[in-house]
Image (cartoon, coloured by chain):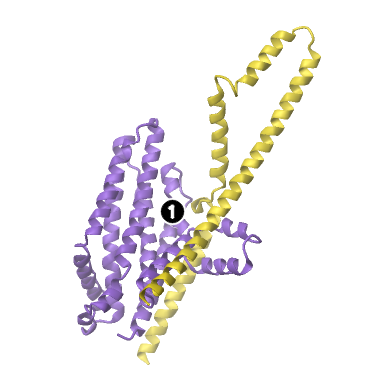
Chain colours: A yellow, B purple
Amino acid sequence: MFFSKYIKIMFITLVLIFISINIPIVYAQDNTTEVQKESIESTDKSKTTETSKEETEEDESDENDSEHKHEHSHVNTDLTGENAEFGREEHHHDHEHDECEYFHKAWREPGTIDIMKKYSLILFSLFGIIVIYRLISKRN
Amino acid sequence: MKNIKQALIIAQLTIEENIRKKILYILLFLSFALIAFSASFTSFDLGAQVTIMKDISLSGIALFGIVLTLSLFLNVIPKEIETKTIYPFITQPITRGTYITGKYIGLMSIIAVNLLILGLELMVVMKIYSDNWNVMIINSIILNILQCGIIGGLMLLFSLFTSYPLTLSITLFLYILGGVSTPYIQYLQGRLPKVLLDFVVFIKLIIPKFDCFNIKDAVVHMNALPQGYFAWATIYGLAYVIITVMIATILFEKKDL
């Protein structure tokens, strides 16, 4: 009897906590993947445009080919060579910025003050009504 | 006026009774140590170090406040009924409302004093490391106290008609759900079963928005709060505190002892 009571309570607690915790987690994970997808798509697009530009430039220039190629190769190896970490860091910060921007902060929302005002008004009027009702019922 | 005096006497007795609890000092010591040693994160540069110190310390203070509230309010009334220490008070010419208000004021004063001590410690540590008094820390602590006040009020309310493990679980559930912001709920439309979503929305309409009291990010990154935000958050918190204590009073008056 003792155990069954506590098992029931534990089960209810676990279910309630699971529901309440999972809501933001599901949202955040799904959201970050969307953000990542968007950023990956955008970087892919920029990369393809860059490579197409490079190709056209390479086609146009016939004579100073070796110097030009060297410059391009230098730019390309920036992300994979010595300065790779710098490039990655920047990319990482961009992701962090995107994710941080997406997470909700109540104090940043302009509507929060209005909600607080409305709720305060409702609750204080409720408090007033209860006080008046109790005073009237005491007199009677 | 007489009722207020009686409530304050009960509050004083409650403080004297609860100040002996060891958990209070253990938690206070741990939080004090966390803030004091937050400066040991020296692997970051100076600007980042101060930011991380503030972030960790404020999170620690918020967690300390919640744990302290849960431990103090958990079985304040049921325990007194069980040990029959409530009867000498009930037989005195004081109303039950006065008794419960006195208990609430006493417990909340302990929490408020503890959180303010930690807040002042954090301010001193910040003065040492960043050479300026960050007054926003106190604003954050006051909102933390109000948040603890609402949690305490809810616990007091639930403890009158449920067992203490259930009180704890319901309060935790409401606290977590109260912290879920509106965009999350909007996002969930069509993704969760309708019944569950309606249930969540219904509870969200009644329970306080606990994320309104979290201004940690503004304090950490030195962002200015919108005009009137702090004042309205304080009024909003007080409104919830008053209502929960009042409902607890009404329930306690109707309780058969």
State which quadrant residue A80 falls in.
Answer: top right
Q: Quadrant of the N terminus of chain B?
A: bottom left
Residue B197, position in %: x, y? Answer: 59, 66
What residue do we see at 58% from left, 53% from top?
Answer: A27
Farthest bottom residue?
A140
What residue do we see at 32% from left, 67% from top?
Answer: B73
Q: Amino acid at mark 1?
A: Asn
Residue bearing the label numbered 1: B214
What residue do we see at 50% from left, 58% from top?
Answer: A21
Label 1: element kind = loop
Q: Residues within 10 Å of mark 1 (few under 14, many from 20)?
A: many
Residue A1, position in %: x, y? Answer: 38, 77
Q: Quadrant of the C terminus of chain B?
A: bottom left
B33 w.r.t. B203: above or below: above
User: B119 or A34: nearer the eye?
Assistant: A34
Residue B45, position in %: x, y? Answer: 39, 30
State which quadrant residue A26 falls in.
Answer: bottom right
Name the side, left or right, on which B183 lies relative to B221: right
Note whether residue B255 is visible. Answer: yes
